[in-house]
Image: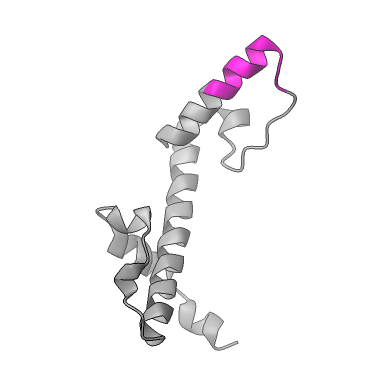
Amino acid sequence: MRCHLGIVALLDKAKELGILDEVHDEGGYWEKRDVAALVKEVGSWNTMVAGFVGRLSDHLEAAGRDRRSMVSAITEFPDFERLEAEGRTGEEEVEGL
């Protein structure tokens, strides 16, 4: 959130100076300036990343590697395990395709 809001503030200044052409903001904050919507979007990104990191760690371990050899900031989140579990929901159905 802090990074996203900081970048938008920087882009606001660039626009004010006339050196900004266009902005594509996948979080939608640039256009809407809706902090609650951005919080929800960033939360869904965190869930997706945590699920991916969990799956990748499993694959490392299955390949005989130490799963702790992978460094990811998301694993430092206090609620990483919850995010990972949510991010992995439905995983069995996807793997079975």
Q: How is the image coloured?
A: one colour
Residue 26 seen anywhere in this rendered image of the structure: yes
Residue 56 pos. (x, y %): 44, 73
Q: Residue at x 43, y 80 (%)?
A: 59
In-image side of 89 versus 29 (left or right): left
* Total numbered circles: 0
Whether 89 is drawn above or below 39: the answer is: below
- Given residues 21 and 87, the one toward you in this image is 21
Residue at 66% of width from left, 11% of height from top? 17
Q: Quadrant of residue 87?
A: bottom left
Mark yes or no: residue 87 visible.
no
Q: Tell which residue pokes out farthest to the bottom in this image.
A: 96
Residue depicted at x 47% and y 78%? 91
Assign the N terminus to one quadrant of the image.
top left
User: In this view of the protein, which residue sits in the foreground, 21 or 82?
Assistant: 21
Q: Furthest residue to the top? A: 17
Q: For the view shown, which residue lies furthest in the left direction?
A: 78
> At which x and y percent is residue 4?
49, 35
Question: Was residue 19 drawn as part of the magenta stretch in this picture?
Answer: yes
Magenta-highlighted residues? 10-20
Residue 55 inside the magenta-drawn segment:
no
- In the rendering, at what x and y percent does residue 3 appear? 45, 35
Image vertical order of residue 21 relative to residue 29, above or below: above
Q: Image quadrant of residue 82?
A: bottom left
Q: Decide: is 84 above or below 20.
A: below
Considering the image in quadrants, where does the C terminus appear? bottom right
Residue 72 x, y percent position in the rendering: 38, 58
Toward the viewer: 66 or 19? 66
Q: Main secondary structure of the magenta part?
A: helix
Q: Residue at x 36, y 81 (%)?
A: 61
User: In this rendering, would 97 be left or right of 88?
Assistant: right
